[in-house]
Amino acid sequence: MPATIITTDDLRDFKLELLDDIKKLLSKQAQGKLKKYLKSSELMDLLQISPGTLQNLRIKGTLPYTKVGGIIFYDSEEIQKVMDNNRVHHKTV
């Protein structure tokens, strides 16, 4: 089984893509199409990420969450704050 090398550029691109997906998700909320609290399965569907990726984002503290009775919820307003805090501006030459 061949190994795949992941570079820091790959990770940065993944982060930017993920944050863009979250931003799109939150723009739906602003239009009144999204619930305030999302379950893990709903967030995974909307962002098209795996359970492992979502778990890694929780473990690393990237996405804040609340656990109630074994169910994990994500506050879409807090996700928006994550988006704002991680916004990357590229200079144009």
Image: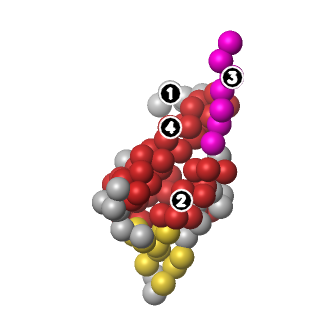
Q: x and y percent of residue 87 in the render?
A: 63, 42
Q: Which residue is mark 2?
A: 79
Q: Residue at x 60, y 55 (%)?
A: 82
Outermost residue on the bottom side: it is 69
Q: Which residue is mark 3?
A: 91
Q: x and y percent of residue 24 in the render?
A: 42, 46
Asked if residue 36 lies left or right of residue 93, the reply is left
Mark 4 vs 3, N-terminal side: 4
Question: Mark 1 and mark 4: span between their CA atoms?
Answer: 25 Å
Q: Which residue is mark 4?
A: 17
Q: Which residue is mark 1?
A: 2
Residue kind at label 4, given as amino acid type: Glu
2 vs 1, front mark? 2
Residue range highlighted in magenta: 87-93
Quarter residue 26 falls in? bottom left
Residue kind at label 1, given as amino acid type: Pro
